Image (cartoon, grey):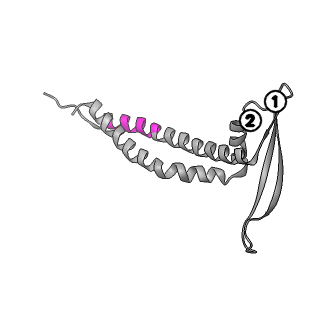
Protein backbone atom coordinates (compact mmCIF):
# COMPACT_ATOMS: atom_id res chain seq x y z
CA UNK A 1 0.00 0.00 0.00
CA UNK A 2 1.31 3.42 -0.89
CA UNK A 3 1.29 6.49 1.36
CA UNK A 4 -1.27 8.37 -0.73
CA UNK A 5 -3.64 5.41 -0.33
CA UNK A 6 -3.31 5.66 3.44
CA UNK A 7 -4.08 9.37 3.22
CA UNK A 8 -7.18 8.67 1.13
CA UNK A 9 -8.41 5.98 3.52
CA UNK A 10 -7.96 8.27 6.54
CA UNK A 11 -9.75 11.17 4.87
CA UNK A 12 -12.56 8.90 3.64
CA UNK A 13 -13.18 7.43 7.10
CA UNK A 14 -13.42 10.89 8.66
CA UNK A 15 -15.69 12.04 5.84
CA UNK A 16 -17.92 9.02 6.35
CA UNK A 17 -18.25 9.46 10.12
CA UNK A 18 -18.09 13.27 10.22
CA UNK A 19 -20.33 13.80 7.23
CA UNK A 20 -23.02 11.55 8.62
CA UNK A 21 -22.78 13.24 12.02
CA UNK A 22 -23.64 16.54 10.31
CA UNK A 23 -27.19 15.21 9.89
CA UNK A 24 -27.40 15.48 13.68
CA UNK A 25 -25.13 18.43 14.40
CA UNK A 26 -26.64 20.94 11.95
CA UNK A 27 -30.24 20.77 13.25
CA UNK A 28 -29.15 20.68 16.89
CA UNK A 29 -26.53 23.41 16.44
CA UNK A 30 -28.94 25.60 14.48
CA UNK A 31 -31.59 25.23 17.16
CA UNK A 32 -29.04 26.12 19.83
CA UNK A 33 -28.10 29.30 17.95
CA UNK A 34 -31.78 30.24 17.66
CA UNK A 35 -32.05 29.87 21.44
CA UNK A 36 -29.29 32.40 22.15
CA UNK A 37 -30.93 35.81 21.55
CA UNK A 38 -27.78 37.95 21.06
CA UNK A 39 -26.33 35.49 18.53
CA UNK A 40 -29.69 35.06 16.77
CA UNK A 41 -30.18 38.83 16.53
CA UNK A 42 -26.66 39.37 15.16
CA UNK A 43 -27.03 36.65 12.50
CA UNK A 44 -30.49 37.91 11.57
CA UNK A 45 -29.22 41.48 11.31
CA UNK A 46 -26.50 40.41 8.87
CA UNK A 47 -29.06 38.64 6.68
CA UNK A 48 -32.05 40.99 6.87
CA UNK A 49 -30.24 44.33 6.79
CA UNK A 50 -26.79 43.86 5.23
CA UNK A 51 -24.75 47.01 5.53
CA UNK A 52 -27.16 48.74 7.91
CA UNK A 53 -25.71 51.46 10.09
CA UNK A 54 -28.21 50.85 12.89
CA UNK A 55 -31.16 48.60 13.64
CA UNK A 56 -33.94 49.62 16.02
CA UNK A 57 -36.16 46.91 17.45
CA UNK A 58 -39.79 47.39 18.46
CA UNK A 59 -41.52 44.57 20.34
CA UNK A 60 -45.30 44.28 20.53
CA UNK A 61 -48.07 41.76 21.29
CA UNK A 62 -46.19 40.32 24.27
CA UNK A 63 -48.27 37.76 26.12
CA UNK A 64 -48.97 34.12 26.89
CA UNK A 65 -49.13 31.63 24.04
CA UNK A 66 -51.44 29.21 25.90
CA UNK A 67 -54.18 29.46 28.51
CA UNK A 68 -52.06 27.43 30.92
CA UNK A 69 -50.55 29.54 33.75
CA UNK A 70 -47.25 27.67 33.33
CA UNK A 71 -47.20 28.14 29.55
CA UNK A 72 -44.63 30.19 27.69
CA UNK A 73 -44.87 33.73 26.44
CA UNK A 74 -44.44 35.10 22.97
CA UNK A 75 -43.96 38.41 21.21
CA UNK A 76 -43.63 39.94 17.78
CA UNK A 77 -40.89 42.23 16.53
CA UNK A 78 -40.51 44.85 13.86
CA UNK A 79 -37.07 46.04 12.91
CA UNK A 80 -36.24 49.37 11.31
CA UNK A 81 -32.90 49.33 9.51
CA UNK A 82 -31.17 52.65 8.87
CA UNK A 83 -28.51 52.83 6.16
CA UNK A 84 -25.66 55.30 5.57
CA UNK A 85 -27.59 57.33 2.99
CA UNK A 86 -30.44 57.87 5.48
CA UNK A 87 -32.85 55.43 3.87
CA UNK A 88 -34.81 53.08 6.09
CA UNK A 89 -36.24 49.60 5.66
CA UNK A 90 -38.98 48.19 7.89
CA UNK A 91 -38.69 44.43 8.38
CA UNK A 92 -41.82 42.54 9.53
CA UNK A 93 -41.87 39.79 12.14
CA UNK A 94 -42.26 36.93 9.66
CA UNK A 95 -39.18 37.91 7.68
CA UNK A 96 -37.14 38.25 10.86
CA UNK A 97 -38.17 34.80 12.05
CA UNK A 98 -37.67 32.90 8.80
CA UNK A 99 -34.42 34.53 7.73
CA UNK A 100 -33.03 34.37 11.27
CA UNK A 101 -33.72 30.65 11.55
CA UNK A 102 -32.20 30.09 8.12
CA UNK A 103 -29.10 32.07 9.07
CA UNK A 104 -28.69 30.10 12.30
CA UNK A 105 -28.88 26.74 10.55
CA UNK A 106 -26.53 27.96 7.83
CA UNK A 107 -23.98 29.08 10.42
CA UNK A 108 -24.20 25.69 12.15
CA UNK A 109 -23.73 23.92 8.80
CA UNK A 110 -20.72 26.00 7.83
CA UNK A 111 -19.04 25.52 11.21
CA UNK A 112 -19.73 21.77 11.16
CA UNK A 113 -18.46 21.45 7.61
CA UNK A 114 -15.25 23.30 8.44
CA UNK A 115 -14.63 21.03 11.43
CA UNK A 116 -15.12 17.92 9.26
CA UNK A 117 -12.78 19.39 6.61
CA UNK A 118 -10.10 20.10 9.22
CA UNK A 119 -10.41 16.59 10.65
CA UNK A 120 -10.14 15.14 7.12
CA UNK A 121 -6.86 16.96 6.53
CA UNK A 122 -5.48 15.77 9.87
CA UNK A 123 -6.60 12.18 9.20
CA UNK A 124 -5.06 12.26 5.73
CA UNK A 125 -1.75 13.37 7.23
CA UNK A 126 -1.84 10.70 9.91
CA UNK A 127 -2.93 8.02 7.42
CA UNK A 128 -0.07 8.91 5.11
CA UNK A 129 2.47 8.63 7.93
CA UNK A 130 1.16 5.34 9.31
CA UNK A 131 1.35 3.47 6.01
CA UNK A 132 4.76 2.10 5.17
CA UNK A 133 5.45 1.61 1.47
CA UNK A 134 6.28 -1.92 0.38
CA UNK A 135 9.91 -2.45 -0.43
CA UNK A 136 10.42 -4.53 -3.54
* Residue at far right of view: 86
Q: Whole-percent x and y of residue 98?
A: 66, 46
Q: Whole-percent x and y of residue 49?
A: 74, 35
Nearer to the camera, 102 or 41: 102
Residue for point 66% across, 54% down: 35
Indicate which disc, 2 or 1, sits on the residue closer to the N terminus.
2
Nearer to the camera, 75 or 104: 75
Q: Quick one: quadrant of the N terminus?
A: top left
At numbered mark 2, what does the secondary structure look like: helix, strand or loop? loop
Say which mark, if any, is on residue 64. Answer: none
At numbered mark 1, what does the secondary structure look like: helix, strand or loop? loop
Q: Quick one: quadrant of the C terminus?
A: top left
Q: Which residues are magenta?
A: 117-127
* Residue at far left of view: 136
Q: Whole-percent x and y of residue 116?
A: 46, 41
Q: Are marks 2 and 1 in contact (CB under 8 Å)?
A: yes
Whether 119 is among the magenta residues is: yes
Residues at marks 2 and 1, CA–CA distance in whole angstroms = 9 Å
Q: Choose top left, top right, bottom left or bottom right for residue 46.
A: top right
Which residue is labeled 2 in the image? 49
Residue for point 82% across, 52% down: 59
Residue for point 16% across, 29% down: 135
Label 1 CA crowd tier, 10 Å (few <14, some 14–19, many 20+): some
Nearer to the camera, 47 or 19: 47
Which residue is labeled 1 in the image? 83
- How many numbered badges does the structure rendering display? 2
Describe residue 30's horizontal placement relative to residue 9 as left or right. Answer: right
Q: Main secondary structure of the magenta part?
A: helix
Nearer to the camera, 50 or 117: 50
Whether 24 is among the magenta residues is: no
Describe residue 129's horizontal placement relative to residue 121 as left or right. Answer: left
Amino acid sequence: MKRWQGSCIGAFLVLLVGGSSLFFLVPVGGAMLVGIPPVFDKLTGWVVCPGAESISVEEYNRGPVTTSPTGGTGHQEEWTCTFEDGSQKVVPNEEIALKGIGASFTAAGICGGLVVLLLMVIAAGIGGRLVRPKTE
